[in-house]
Amino acid sequence: MKKGIFWILALAILALLQSGLQGYIGAYYYQIVIFVGINIILAVSLNLINGTTGQFSIGHAGFYAVGAYTSASLLYYGEPTFRGWISFLPHSAQDVVLLLFGLLAAALAAGFAGLLVGIPSLRLRGDYLAIVTLGFGEIIRVLILNINAVGAARGFLGIPEFSNFFWVYLFALITVVVVHNLVNSSYGRAFISIRDDEIAAEAMGIDTTRFKVMSFVISSMFAGIAGGLFAHFTAFLSPNTFQFTTSFYLIIMIVVGGMGSIEGAILGAILITVILEAFREFGAFRFVNFAVLLVLVMLFRPQGIVGSWSLFRKAGAR
Amino acid sequence: MATFLQQIINGIAQGSAYALIALGYTMVYGVLRLINFAHSDVYMFGAFMGYYTANNPWIKSTFGQSLTAAAVVMLIAMVLSAGLGILIERFAYRPNRSETRFTLAFWLGILGAAAGQLMSPGFFALTLGAAIGIAIGVVGEIAGLRPVRQDSRLSLLIIAIGVSLFLENGGQVAFGADPKFFPEIIQTAQWNVVGLKVDSQQVIVLGVSIILMVLLNLLVHYTRTGKAMRAVSYNLDAAKLMGINTDRIIALTFAVGSALAAAGGILVTLLYPKIEPLMGVMPGLKAFAAAVLGGIGNMTGAMLGGLILGIAEVMAVGYGQSTYRDAIAFIILVLILLVKPDGIMGKGPTEKV
């Protein structure tokens, strides 16, 4: 009952904001708000691997790319066919069905990619895993650069525009709720125990490999959804968006916010996205200033801004 | 067959440059357990220092186009890069580990200089901004704003990413974002050795790499400092208890690694003379992959990994599609790690319960 009211209220607020937001704040700020939402999905999902399960992945941009290109190419090439199947629906409802279909495909494709990366993670630990995830992200990017059907290095133009504020923030909310519930479930306890002490976790009868792969797959699925939302918002994809620097920025978000905490990941996503936009006025010095600030934050507050503090802390949870 | 051997020669030249960069990664990893992402930008810095030295009128008129000129350019670039490595270690990595001073002043000084430059471009505003920043930093430090000392590899890693971002973008501001072309400091000669083309650049790259690696090996295995370096990399805390000045040894490790990266930078520009502030990113990643491939922390492994990747990459470009060039290194890395999870020469970590 309480949950029902929460979701109805959330949907109502999102729909209300959707109807007026863009006209009120203008196209530029609207776009930043959207990117903040997408980064929240990415950061919260990455936090599941890096913060909760304690594995070190720096290839999140790869899953993001898989989702974005899957959904984009599916709807770019398949839109007329799919519309034919659901022609009994009104046009706007068709858009919704198409978007959800694209996002589902994005999540599945990215989840499969996560499974592929998760399997080597059975044997690798620490920095070896880090470089493999990074390498995987780069391999994905180089593959995209070589596929002509999705525009290769020129970029992918003319992707149907379906996503907007409502969908981005609805999925951001879903991501947060799902990850929060997951972390506070017996699965989440298993993830945390792997992070804290893998050997002890194994001794307690936790199938560590299974849970590690599971956290990779779930996290990648959300990254895939974020990719789909991004693709159908900007209507243009370039392989440069998915360079390993994107993964680095996501890591920065979760560490600056506070590793292992969902609130930290959300705060980090908002903060980093907004700061990077605000620093545009510094021109050539934009990233110089950003880098120095980043180093200072890490030197003087290494636990992140939020630390491991939690807004909805339940007994014993971290 | 002749083409194959030719590709091997090209690959060895490319690979020895990767190996030099990979050595820096592996050495720093050995002492700090840190993936030093800033290393690839020290490589870029080295190449630029070489560029400015080589274009210096005095150097040009004194040495001209000769081996001596190349040696002088390379030495100066190596020394300057070693200095940069020490600076990075001192102000970015050390505050995390031991008591340091002027960290805040250093970084605020840079921010101040950037702010001054933004307000009115010129030397005066730059120094004034830097001075104000340093003053605020010193006051802050006296007031008790000190870096938090803690043993967190993760925040160290983020700092490394930050320093790397700083050097790349600082390089774009300081050196300009447009590519530059390295002057030809050595005359190109080409020889035919049993039907294979070998040019003087390739011989120099290979020769210098071998000399540097032999010197490094002598330093690490046959001097007291080298012994201390090995001790620190084996167990930092125990080394400290044995009376080794670990901070000094770590700084020295950064200096040596950075000098090797600079040498690598100059050698690569002999083969491909285009330099730009982002030139370090891809070679850096690949060299890091090489270090991991060989077993990170292991110096022989880094050299071997560099050679494998260099040869594989040249082969892939020669026989396959050059557009996949950047993926080859990582595909090989994944394949080898699937078979040997600790790299070719790596020893698995001992697990303590």
Image (cartoon, coloured by chain):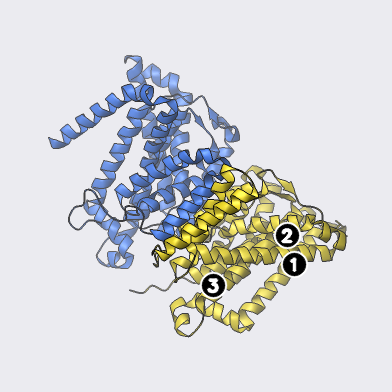
Q: Residue at x 55, y 56 (%)?
A: B131
Q: Is residue A219 visible?
A: no
Location of mark 2 (residue) = B267
Mark 2 / mark 3, whichever is N-terminal: 3
Q: Is residue B137 visible?
A: yes
Where residue A262 sits: x, y (%)? 30, 48
Q: Secondary structure at mark 3?
A: helix
Q: Nearer the viewer, residue B4 or A253?
A: A253
Q: Are marks 2 and 3 in contact (CB under 8 Å)?
A: no
Q: CA distance from mark 1 to mark 3?
A: 25 Å
Q: Residue at x 39, y 38 (%)?
A: A36
Location of mark 3 (residue) = B250
Q: Are marks 2 and 1 in contact (CB under 8 Å)?
A: yes
Q: CA distance from mark 2 to mark 3?
A: 26 Å
Label 2 CA crowd tier, 10 Å (few <14, some 14–19, many 20+): many
Q: Residue at x 62, y 47 (%)?
A: B173
Q: Quadrant of residue A129?
A: bottom left
Q: Quadrant of residue A34?
A: top left
Let me know if marks 1 and 3 both belong to one chain. Answer: yes
What colour do you see for chain A?
blue
Mark 1 / mark 3, whichever is N-terminal: 1
Judge whether A317 appears above or below A149 on screen: below
Disc 3 marks a residue whose amino acid type is Ile
Location of mark 1 (residue) = B208
Which chain does yellow denote in the image? B
Number of on-image labels:
3
Where residue B250 sits: x, y (%)? 54, 72
